[in-house]
Amino acid sequence: MIKDFVSLKLEEVSRIVSNLKRLLEVARKAEVPIIYANHVLKSKEGSKVVDDLKPAKGDLIIEKSEYSAFSRTGLDKMLRKLRVKDIILVGIYTDLCIKHTIADAFHRGYRIVVPYDCVESYEEDNSGALSKLKKVYDVEVTSSKTLIKQLLASSLRVDDNYHR
């Protein structure tokens, strides 16, 4: 959700910001590790996360130069160190960055969850892109509301040896 990418689809992306804010708030309260995978651009300002979704203290940030957040970033090593088995992917663009990150996560054995109301596509129809990802990579597509309920319930049973 970096500024330069959001500006390309501002109207569509503005619909998911409130869902993303709420999901981030609940995830932080549930002590779920939050990792921002920011695409590095020529413009330092354009590479920053939009103000409404800025990283909070304790959130992790990786910089990437390719579509996948796994490509030459050390993300897999970071997730393994945190003992993460399930990943929730949000942001833009479902048909580019999200898709390539999902493919890499799938091949590394992670369980993948995507709240459909927290992602937006660039050129492809978002529901069509999600349908393909669900079929090809066994992605669990859900709503942010359902995911928030699950996070709130699981935060009551936090196990120090396992992070969602």
Image (spheres, rainbow, N blue to C red):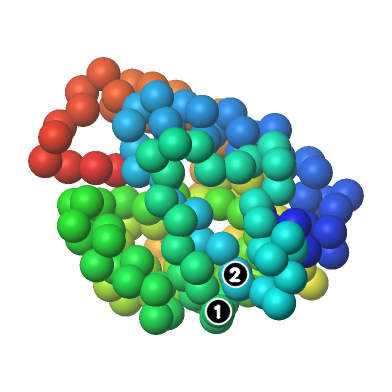
- Residue 21 visible in the snapshot: yes
In the image, 137 versus 39, the foreground residue is 39
Q: Residue furthest top?
A: 156
Residue 114: x and y in percent read 51, 51
Name the residue at 27% across, 58% down. Answer: 79
Going by the image, does 134 lie left or right of 39?
left
Q: Secondary structure at mark 2?
A: strand
Image quadrant where one finds the C terminus: top left
Q: Residue furthest right?
A: 11
Going by the image, does 14 lie left or right of 36?
right
Name the residue at 53% across, 33% down. Answer: 23
Image quadrant where one finds the N terminus: bottom right
In the image, residue 17 above or below residue 66: above
In the image, residue 5 above or below residue 164: below
Q: Amino acid at mark 1?
A: Ser
Which residue corresponds to mark 2?
A: 39
Residue 111: x and y in percent read 32, 57
Name the residue at 50% across, 68% down. Answer: 63
Label 2–label 1 contact, CB within 8 A: yes
Crowd class of label 2 (few under 14; some 14 to 19; many from 20; radius 10 Å):
many
Name the residue at 27% across, 61% down. Answer: 78
In the image, 134 versus 16, the foreground residue is 16
Which residue corresponds to mark 1?
A: 65
Which is more N-terminal, label 1 or label 2?
2
Residue 159: x and y in percent read 15, 32
In the image, residue 36 above or below residue 154: below
